[in-house]
Image (spheres, rainbow, N blue to C red):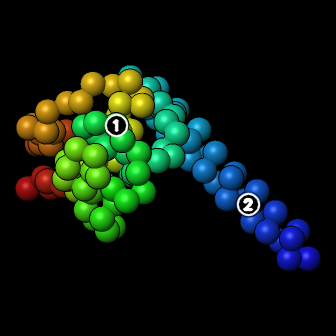
Amino acid sequence: NVRQKAGLNRSILDQGWRMFRTLLGYKLADRGGKLVEVPAAYTSQTCSVCGRVDPANRANQARFVCTACGHTENADINAAKNILRRADYPLMPVEGHRIRRPNEAGSTRRAA
């Protein structure tokens, strides 16, 4: 029964992510966005500067150090750059990425 249970669990988990992807795609399309699926394999081991893939590039969970070119960066940021490139999107500058609009729907301000 263990093998059947594992298969059932896998099926349930797959359904959950599929439903999430469907709803996210629907919401993005409604707001003028687009859902782009990107294979994330080896993005955390690939250097965003030179492209070298090496498991040794991950010095630890939080730090990325390329063994080929010496590039150092936060591991999550490096992986995010690789994912953006795989999605064929240009890298955007970080400045202004969190612009607050006070009159936007969902604001936490309360009427007096």
Q: Is residue 33 above or below residue 54?
A: above
Q: Is residue 4 above or below residue 44?
A: below
Q: Residue at x 34, y 37 (%)?
A: 51
Q: Report the residue that reaches farthest toward the front.
A: 68
Q: Amino acid at mark 1?
A: Gly
Q: Please, what secondary structure does the residue beneath circle 1 have?
A: loop
Q: Earlier in the sequence, mark 2 or mark 1?
A: 2
Image coordinates for residue 107, horizontal then vertical, percent: 20, 49
Q: Residue at x 24, y 30 (%)?
A: 91
Q: Are marks 2 and 1 in contact (CB under 8 Å)?
A: no
The answer to whether residue 105 is visible is: no
Q: Residue at x 41, y 51 (%)?
A: 54
| Left or right relative to 52: residue 62 | left
How many residues crowd mark 2 within 10 Å: few (<14), some (14–19), many (20+)? Answer: few
| Quadrant of the drawing holding the C terminus | bottom left
Q: Residue at x 56, y 41 (%)?
A: 21
Q: Amino acid at mark 2?
A: Arg
Image coordinates for residue 28, horizontal then vertical, percent: 43, 31
**Which of these two is toward me, 26 or 78?**
78
| Quadrant of the drawing holding the N terminus | bottom right
- The answer to which image quadrant residue 18 occupies is top right
**Which of these two is toward me, 91 or 52?**
52
Q: Please, what secondary structure does the residue beneath circle 2 have?
A: helix
Q: Which mark is residue 10?
A: 2
Q: Which mark is in front, 2 or 1?
A: 1
Q: Which residue is mark 1?
A: 51
How many residues crowd mark 1 within 10 Å: few (<14), some (14–19), many (20+)? Answer: some
Image coordinates for residue 65, horizontal then vertical, percent: 25, 56
Q: How many marks?
A: 2
- The answer to which image quadrant residue 94 occupies is top left
